[in-house]
Image: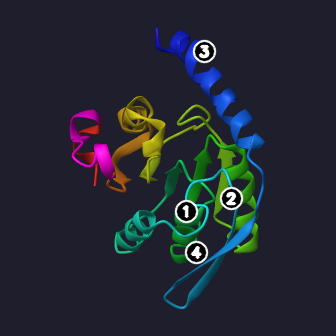
Amino acid sequence: DKELYYQRYIRKDYEKLNKLWNKVKSNKRNLYYNYGDSSFTFVSDNGVFSKDEYDQGSEILVKSLLGESLNGRILDLGCGIGCMGIVLARFIPSIFVEMVDINERAVQLCQKNIKANKIGNAKVYISNIYEQVDGLFENIVTNPPIRAGKKVIYEFFEKAKDYLTVNGNLYVCKPRGKFRNMNITPLVGDNVV
């Protein structure tokens, strides 16, 4: 039973991870990102993904998404400090971006970054993958946490179809390293871009 498995293993992993992240000594710093005529400032810290720079894969994904016709609700899955979701929300004011991450420190920083960048069409909350996510989304965007391992990555993809509208799409930053040749179409169907 998947629910029992989650209660026994995944929930414990989540609690262990956040205890580890909270033990990492804080060293906050600002990251600056410019796109077009817009400037963004992101507060980052130790213990979060891409703590020292705007991740190149995320940047490529965001730039390609800005060329798409995004609308409605967008889920930024594994949002980190909010770089992708905040940029999308600024440039496409007609969307509403929900950002989720398992890392409490990342979520706290993302909340600060939403406020600092004056974003009114986004929110962030703690969620272990889809655990706290509710409803359907027109699009899900993710730069998956490759270091979390295959089991976690596959859950990102396998459950996406349960949270997408009929014509919704999953936009994925192509993994590098050992996952670079992974074919996720069998996991999510033809809705992956």
Circles 3 and 1 in contact, beta carbons < 8 Å: no
Circles 2 and 1 in contact, beta carbons < 8 Å: yes
Secondary structure at badge 1 equals helix
Count neighbours of disc 1 (C-alpha within 10 A) and say few if under 14, some if 14 to 19, many if 20 or more: many
Q: CA distance from mark 3 to mark 1?
A: 29 Å
Q: Position of residue 171 (x, y in %)?
A: 36, 55
Q: Position of residue 61 (x, y in %)?
A: 38, 65
Q: Decide which of tag 3 and tag 1 comes sooner along the chain.
A: 3
- Dividing the picture into quarters, in which one does residue 102 lie? top right
Name the residue tied to disc 4.
90
Highlighted magenta segment, given as a residue range: 176-187
> Given the image, on which type of amino acid does mark 3 rest?
Gln
Identify the residue at horizontal 45%, vertical 33% (top origin): 152
> Can you tell which of label 4 and label 2 is closer to the viewer?
2
Q: Position of residue 111 (x, y in %)?
A: 73, 58
Q: Is 24 rendered above or below residue 54? A: above
> Given the image, on which type of amino acid does mark 1 rest?
Gly
Name the mark on residue 112. Answer: none
Q: Decide which of tag 2 and tag 1 comes sooner along the chain.
A: 1
Circles 4 and 2 in contact, beta carbons < 8 Å: no
Q: Horizontal placement of 16 versus 143: left or right?
A: right
Count neighbours of disc 3 (C-alpha within 10 A) and say few if under 14, some if 14 to 19, many if 20 or more: few
Name the residue tied to disc 1.
85
Secondary structure at badge 3 equals helix
Identify the residue at horizontal 24%, vertical 39% (top origin): 189
Name the residue tied to disc 3.
7
> Given the image, on which type of amino acid does mark 2 rest?
Cys
Name the residue tied to disc 2.
110
> Can you tell which of label 3 and label 1 is closer to the viewer?
3
Q: Decide which of tag 4 and tag 2 comes sooner along the chain.
A: 4
